[in-house]
Amino acid sequence: MRTSNYLLSTQKETPAEAEVISHQLMIRAGMIRKLASGLYTWLPSGLRVLNKVADIVREEMNRAGAVEVLMPVVQPADLWQESGRWDEYGPELLRVKDRQQRDFVLGPTHEEVITSLVRTEVNSYKQLPLNLYQIQTKFRDEVRPRFGIMRGREFTMKDAYSFHLDDSCLAKTYEVMYDTYCRIFERMGLDYRAVIADSGAIGGSVSHEFHVLAASGEDAIAFSDSSGYAANVEMAPAPVADAQVSSGAPVTTATKDSNTSLDAFYSAQGKQANQALTVTVVKGHSDDDAETWVALVLRADHTLNSVKAEKLESVAAPLTIASEEKATQLLGCNPLSANPLECKLPVVADYSAAALADFICGAGTADTYLINANWQEQPATADLRNVEAGDASPDGEGALEIKRGIEVGHIFQLGDKYSQAMNCGVLSETGKHQTLTMGCYGIGVSRIVAAAIEQNHDKFGIIWPDPIAPFKVALIPMNMHKSQRIKDTAEAIYQQLTDLGVEVLFDDRKERPGVMFNDMELIGVPHSIVIGERNLDNQQVEYKNRRSGEKQLLDVDAVSEFVRAL
Amino acid sequence: MRTSNYLLSTQKETPAEAEVISHQLMIRAGMIRKLASGLYTWLPSGLRVLNKVADIVREEMNRAGAVEVLMPVVQPADLWQESGRWDEYGPELLRVKDRQQRDFVLGPTHEEVITSLVRTEVNSYKQLPLNLYQIQTKFRDEVRPRFGIMRGREFTMKDAYSFHLDDSCLAKTYEVMYDTYCRIFERMGLDYRAVIADSGAIGGSVSHEFHVLAASGEDAIAFSDSSGYAANVEMAPAPVADAQVSSGAPVTTATKDSNTSLDAFYSAQGKQANQALTVTVVKGHSDDDAETWVALVLRADHTLNSVKAEKLESVAAPLTIASEEKATQLLGCNPLSANPLECKLPVVADYSAAALADFICGAGTADTYLINANWQEQPATADLRNVEAGDASPDGEGALEIKRGIEVGHIFQLGDKYSQAMNCGVLSETGKHQTLTMGCYGIGVSRIVAAAIEQNHDKFGIIWPDPIAPFKVALIPMNMHKSQRIKDTAEAIYQQLTDLGVEVLFDDRKERPGVMFNDMELIGVPHSIVIGERNLDNQQVEYKNRRSGEKQLLDVDAVSEFVRAL
């Protein structure tokens, strides 16, 4: 590709509205342009990467025995009414009426459509198992689209759905998909982790997420420093702490000055946050829908894990934390100083909180605290906190580390949530009607592009891994328009590399070399060949590696062979 | 691909709702399934063809120097308001509101989005010309979706838009696109014609359509039997007829019995339809919007061409033909018997009608006709009729033939319709602001799949041209599940062909041979290899060509080489 025929569209300025580096670089490198909130046009350099990502996903899905289909973007509402999600799904589901005033949705996902397809097309156990996927445009009307295509409204997703007679067959395909996802992210040259995940609103039991590791990631993931264990922090169980024994020190009270921080107050009492308790009031769950509230007690150095909390029988999902005003009213004092030992609400204590002795906690009066308090009777306990770096790994091997990740894939053992609601079954080998069990497997194809940039960039721009780079080689002739031999050499190398099937971006603009270097670094082309007068005197050109910065001189005649070997 | 892992979904019965053969065969061969009116899921066999078509289009667009982008399906209404099409476009434009109650449309086409992109990204004449394209999902809310994906609501289109400083540059790119389209349809193995076309509502001057020839085509196209001339019948100019000279025979009148057909009546008068005139009343156009009507006069053997008629200054566009009641009221008698020589409305006569002498025409009283009438004074004339087989070709070379075609591509020299309305220009070499001139180039990617079937089928099913076939080879082992050597031979051939990169559909189902033959013929796999006991006794298998029906025996060892040579 010659830049003169191309839409390069690079820009120097960092766009003000772009909060994360991938969004900034995608705009600066001419990969995307905003059309409206959460809606982006993919410019040529962006689309080349997107298509490479999609091609790798497609190749590996095919290799894994999945079969590609293509379902419509626009879906009839009646299927969503049948599954129950017409009512369940919030305003992220964009509902539209056609010219006949019939209801449709723009598909945010395709469980309903695929289940309705399979219930008509698959009638016999002989046709199973079946794994169908598509790479397709999805729409979610996000309340706050942000980070460019990382959380856009229209995006490209690979979604696969597998259908099985029983759960053991589902588990096998799930494992194949797990391995396939690993191969996909490995082939893309990304540093990723598969982690145990919550199956959340989609339903089902077993679930894993795939995260591209990046400091800017929205998710925290915990993994063992000694084994393969990795889980979303949402899901990683915290170790059960050994019960401490009270020293028998007398219980005293102390009053905290409103100018003193809690940590400073603990310190003044000869304690630390890991020897203090805090109370959080959350909405409770009761079978008769009566309003109930629950007091969750954690160690002051720990953070509440909402996914764990909302799985408690006595707590309502999704987790609702009481406002300070509401909590004060329920507890009889500000929650900071609430006394977990004499609480007006049912108490559930985190394991670590229940294990403490001689701790600090609220005395039930504003700003007053008990020092060296102890549980009089053992409270109800549960795992309520986020794990932290240094916690023992749940598999018993080593300690946990915490990293940030960007979720780019999610696989679920769905079970019969959709097949039951939509009556999707077959005749089994014994002639009985049998409801199918399902898996579903998503990859955020467009999101991968942003995640790869979050993980691969420097102050000059993007550093693409070779397999998903928009071009493999940038060909940069300096002042070609003034020198016939530079032009001839550039054209010859361009021809040779193109004949080899190498994707070359040939910068044939009448621009200063500095402009050309900056653009190619910004776009992130992994390999550059620079043609200049001085080196050409020795029949040489300069090679530069975008990632390592390594430079070396190559004989003009050796360029093809060098690039082929890369 | 093994059928046991695949979703074959063939069916024997012809679906009742499918009116055209391509729709019937696409359902029977398991290529598509209807989700809702005009909305189809592409099953694996359909999608394989669709992807092949898209790949050929992409390769040839890239070769022609066009650059791929991807614009959103969902477009903000403000761009459509800016171009004026928010008001102009009818209910085919599906309008939606997002959760913030902002107006959007589902894109039926992308002129607005691309023009808005180019006006921000392209600022200098140095960046021109530029040809941007996408292969993308479009939505048109057709009032009567029909013929399966031939006229669906959601469909896949390749749309390209080129931008130029001047019309001569536009004309050059237009020519490149013309040649590219020819190469695309040739590569697909389709019998097609490029024809001169009406640019219609899209605007602009020069325009060509590309038609796949098929008896079931919705369009009639006229082409010379001696030159390269070809045009949509809408656009082909009819030859100007030489004026006939009256024989001086006396004018008489005759009354037609209501049981007699017009042709029989002409015959009884010693005349034919080509010696008679008919009157059609259409809505007129006036600058002050007053209601006016015009009488169009044609030879009785000719048909009115609405595109030609609505281009007349005195006729309203789109063409509106008066109801019989309205015409009777305006003419003072039934239009069949209206007298064009003494008409109450302004008359425009087709050239052939104006050239007649001694003709039959209405006498101005119901069922009464003049015999041997002649024009007293020359009427206003125009080209109003559709050309017919045998008419002289407009380029003066040979005679016209008429064939039916399915429109699969359309290219336009748009001019500045959008760039003017949306203020899309650049600084020219002399530093002046210059509005760009545009071309646009569409291909109905999904429609090609249906058109190819209309052109390539027999009573057994589809006959794919090799380049767009879902599989190249069907491998059919007879009773494999009972014979180990058949199974071994089939597996070995499957492995060899797959290693060669050949796409093979290996029918490993436990089905009777007849079922397998029928399915493979229905799906239209171009080449079959049948493995049976008898031939295997001689170390042979049978090859069958789907199109020619030709069969031949191949040595088992020679299969790879034979397939490679195909």
Image: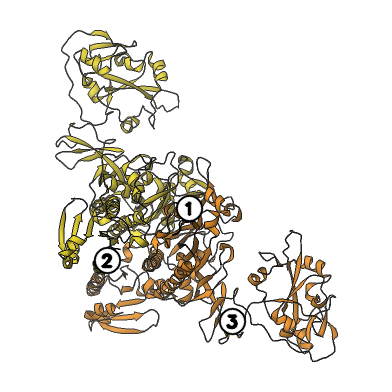
Chain colours: A orange, B yellow
Going by the numbered disc 2, the residue's amino acid type is Lys
The Cα–Cα distance between marks 2 and 1, rounded to whole angstroms, is 35 Å
Indicate the quadrant containing the C terminus of chain B: top left, top right, bottom left or bottom right. Answer: bottom left
Quarter-of-image position of residue A336: bottom right
What residue does disc 3 label? A394
At mark 3, the secondary structure is: loop
Horizontal relation, residue B313 to residue A418: left or right:
left
What residue does disc 1 label? A116
Going by the numbered disc 3, the residue's amino acid type is Pro
Query: Is residue A476 something one can see in this rendering?
Result: yes
Horizontal relation, residue B214 to residue B19: left or right:
left
Please tell me how many numbered marks the rendered image carries. 3
Numbered badge on residue B424? none
At mark 2, the secondary structure is: helix
Q: Against B311, is B42 above or below?
A: below
The Cα–Cα distance between marks 2 and 3, rounded to whole angstroms, is 49 Å
Residue at image location 66% in from the left, 64% down from the top: A318
Residue A224 image offset from top left, x and y in percent: 54, 83
Q: Do labels 2 and 3 share a chain?
A: no
Numbered badge on residue B487? 2
Quarter-of-image position of residue A62: bottom left
Residue A198 image offset from top left, x and y in percent: 57, 70
For this rendering, which residue is in front, B299 or A331? A331
Residue at image location 36% in from the left, 15% down from the top: B334
Q: Which of marks 2 and 3 is in front?
A: 2
Residue at image location 64% in from the left, 72% down from the top: A308
Q: Against B339, is A507 above or below?
A: below
The Cα–Cα distance between marks 3 and 1, rounded to whole angstroms, is 40 Å
Residue B311 image offset from top left, x and y in percent: 33, 32
Which of the two labelled residues, at mark 3 and mark 1, occupies the earlier sequence position? 1
Going by the numbered disc 1, the residue's amino acid type is Ser
Residue B505 image offset from top left, x and y in percent: 29, 60
